[in-house]
């Protein structure tokens, strides 16, 4: 786990200035405090910050092949590097034990085809001086970040946008369409970022560029899910195969030359990871969790303790406070580069900080809800479909994964989602699936009350819906369930993985996510929706696969929390002045972005678990950090 940065000039006669690469590296030094390096080759400059995990002494980057004609900077881990090395040693001479060198030699043999052989999380850039081309790639689901900017003279790339600004060649500006994305979804779609002119390489894609020949790079997709249903195997087969892949993913991701531990929330996902990892780890296995003392609705540490005791781990807890929230949030938003997907950012940072005091690598349960279908909104959407089928007599026409009879036992899960259901059923009942799911996730209605007229004009909603619909109705996603999970995997999951990356790297901790092994994703998306979401039972196949691994108290729990943060209580209490000082300040008023009367009303009435204030607070702090320049050039947390 590291940080990469670089500059490539189109004109081969223009050398990259070393001080710019050094400045870019300095901006992301928190990602890799153990080592650093540069490679200057005329119009190409590569920079690297290392967090040493594999081959602690031999993994210096930028790294070259045997004859020094191909160079790489690489952020991430290739978990199957041991197996790859055995195959490559017949043709190549290795200087290190690193996974980095495996990528280099695979590229020499297969070119872009090397990506198909990699099991891991990665973003990397290869400078092939023989072919005079840049080859960059990002892992299949977007675990590791990659940002780039292209002007008429040069390409800049980095693990974080702040490094691009540190070069002195890019100025942070707000992209108005991306701002509409954020106000709609609280994240950006596709390759967009909130910064004008800065793109992210999308998951499962690579970038290929001959800078001295072509004005623009070629971007291509090398991996995607297909939703081609496997009708040859039974549900029992899928359960067994999933359990086997979970075990193998853990086996691979425990590979490390430094201590490994795990995040443990007490939910089924992280508990499964801990159970499998602790049973296989060769020494003491440490687990880390957090909770809030504001009430039982904010505390699931008892479940985490049950799992820790069941798995025999050395368990650690942290209890973040409202004062720590106020102290760290402005700086944490800067580390995020873009506003966060949810308030879980704060406790996730606190637990990462606790973990870094004890280990250098952690495993986590991220991705389970998106891959296996764990969100209650899927059940809400299908409840409407069942009503529609019952009223119009179409329930038996094969269009529905669930029926009214078998969905009923799962409906108690929706008790805590009454406000969401009231909003959802307020209008548009029985409209098309894409329109209804957009209504479930869109925040534009709420934004109208607090965002100034003109920021999201009359055409904004139509544009956002069209961009949403293009992803939602992707080819092959014929069922409602596949459409919903595919959209969340392509949009929400990268946003959550951004949080995962930044909270861990801000404290120089490597975070691994075993549930997102691409083999698991490919298996799950081959299952029919009738198996994946049978009877509206969220995460049914996953739960069946892991039941033998978990204590009954965790497997049978009905109060899924997802690390809730008491920000509503804090904003009505000890953080009321903190909130007002930011959102009602002269600085915020002069920005011209907010309806200040609407902001004032929102502060008075925001629900306990509401997300509007959180979204506004993050947006204003982001403007201060980057657009106003308050935080640019600062060091890490």
Image (tube, grey):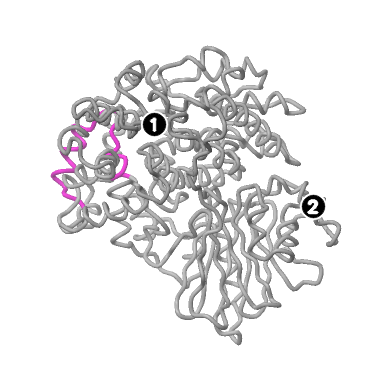
Left-right relation of 160 to 417 = right
**Label 2–label 1 contact, CB within 8 A:** no
Q: Residue at x 63, y 64 (%)?
A: 112
Report if residue 121 is visible in the image: yes
Which quarter of the picture shows residue 240? top right
For the stretch drawn in magenta, the main secondary structure is: helix
The x, y position of residue 207, in whole percent, is: 54, 66
Q: Is residue 161 above or below residue 378?
A: below
Q: Is residue 39 above or below residue 361?
A: below
Q: Is residue 473 magenta?
A: no
Q: Is residue 242 above or below residue 590?
A: above
Give the mark, 2 or 1, whose residue is nearer the N terminus: 2
Left-right relation of 150 to 43 = left
The x, y position of residue 145, in whole percent, is: 53, 54
Q: What residue is disc 2 on?
A: 85
Q: Which residues are magenta?
A: 594-617
How would you rate the neighbour count of disc 2 (Cα within 10 Å): few for under 14, some for 14-19, many for 20 or more?
Answer: many
The x, y position of residue 577, in whole percent, is: 27, 37
Q: Residue at x 74, y 73 (%)?
A: 69
> Residue 375: which numbered mark, if any?
1
Distance of label 2 from label 1 (alpha carbons): 40 Å
Q: Is residue 595 magenta?
A: yes
Left-right relation of 282 to 314 = right
> Residue 420: which numbered mark, if any?
none
How would you rate the neighbour count of disc 1 (Cα within 10 Å): few for under 14, some for 14-19, many for 20 or more?
Answer: some
As drawn, the residue found furthest toward the bottom would be 13
């Amino acid at each position: 786990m590291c940080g990469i940065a670089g500059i490539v000039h189109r004109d081969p006669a223009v050398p990259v200035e070393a001080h710019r690469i050094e400045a870019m590296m300095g901006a992301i030094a928190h990602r890799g405090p153990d080592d650093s390096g540069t490679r200057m080759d005329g119009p190409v400059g590569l920079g690297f910050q290392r967090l040493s995990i594999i081959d602690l002494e031999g993994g210096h980057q930028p790294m070259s092949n045997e004859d020094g004609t191909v160079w790489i900077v690489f952020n991430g881990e290739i978990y199957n590097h041991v197996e790859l090395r055995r195959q490559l040693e017949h043709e190549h001479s290795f200087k290190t034990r690193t996974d980095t060198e495996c990528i280099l030699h695979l590229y020499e043999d297969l070119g872009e085809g090397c990506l198909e052989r990699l099991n891991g999380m990665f973003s990397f850039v290869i400078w092939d001086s023989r072919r005079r081309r840049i080859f960059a790639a990002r892992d299949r689901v977007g675990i590791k970040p990659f940002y780039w900017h292209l002007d008429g003279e040069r390409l800049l790339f980095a693990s974080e946008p702040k490094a691009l600004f540190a070069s002195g060649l890019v100025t942070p500006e707000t992209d108005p369409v991306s701002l509409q994305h954020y106000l709609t979804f609280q994240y950006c779609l596709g390759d967009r970022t909130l910064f004008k002119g800065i793109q992210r390489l999308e998951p499962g894609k690579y970038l290929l560029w001959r800078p001295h020949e072509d004005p623009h790079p070629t971007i291509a997709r090398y991996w995607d899910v297909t939703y081609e249903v496997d009708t040859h195997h039974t549900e029992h087969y899928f359960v067994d195969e999933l359990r086997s892949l979970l075990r193998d993913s853990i086996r691979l991701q425990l590979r490390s030359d430094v201590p490994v531990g795990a995040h443990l929330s007490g939910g089924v996902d992280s508990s499964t990871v801990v159970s499998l990892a602790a049973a296989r780890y060769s020494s003491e296995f440490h687990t880390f969790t957090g909770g809030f003392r504001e009430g039982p609705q904010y505390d699931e540490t008892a479940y985490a303790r049950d799992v820790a005791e069941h798995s025999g781990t050395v368990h650690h807890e942290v209890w973040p406070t409202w004062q720590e929230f106020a102290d760290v949030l402005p700086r944490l938003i800067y580390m995020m580069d873009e506003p966060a997907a949810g308030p879980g950012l704060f406790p996730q940072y606190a637990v990462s900080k606790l973990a870094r005091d004890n280990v250098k690598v952690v495993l986590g349960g991220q991705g389970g809800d998106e891959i296996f279908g764990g969100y209650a909104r899927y059940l809400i959407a299908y409840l409407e479909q069942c009503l529609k089928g019952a009223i119009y007599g179409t329930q038996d026409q094969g269009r529905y994964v669930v029926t009214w009879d078998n969905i009923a036992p799962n409906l108690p899960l929706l008790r805590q989602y009454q406000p969401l259901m009231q909003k959802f059923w307020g209008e548009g009942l029985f409209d098309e699936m894409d329109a209804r799911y957009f209504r479930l996730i869109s925040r534009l209605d709420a934004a109208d009350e607090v965002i100034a007229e003109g920021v999201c004009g009359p055409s904004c909603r139509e544009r956002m819906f069209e961009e949403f619909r293009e992803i939602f109705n992707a080819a092959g996603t014929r069922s409602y369930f596949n459409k919903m999970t595919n959209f969340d995997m392509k949009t929400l999951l990268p946003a959550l993985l951004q949080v995962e990356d930044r909270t861990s790297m801000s404290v120089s901790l490597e975070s691994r996510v075993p549930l997102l092994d691409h083999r698991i994703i490919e298996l799950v998306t081959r299952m029919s929706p009738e198996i994946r979401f049978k009877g509206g039972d969220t995460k049914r196949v996953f739960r069946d696969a892991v039941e033998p691994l978990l204590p009954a108290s965790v497997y049978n729990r009905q109060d899924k929390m997802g690390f809730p943060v008491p920000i509503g209580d804090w904003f009505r209490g000890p953080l009321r002045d903190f909130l007002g000082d930011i959102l009602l300040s002269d600085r915020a008023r002069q920005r011209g972005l907010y309806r200040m009367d609407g902001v004032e009303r929102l502060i008075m009435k925001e629900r306990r678990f509401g997300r509007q204030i959180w979204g506004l607070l993050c947006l204003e702090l982001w403007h201060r950090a980057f657009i106003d320049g308050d935080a640019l050039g600062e060091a890490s947390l």
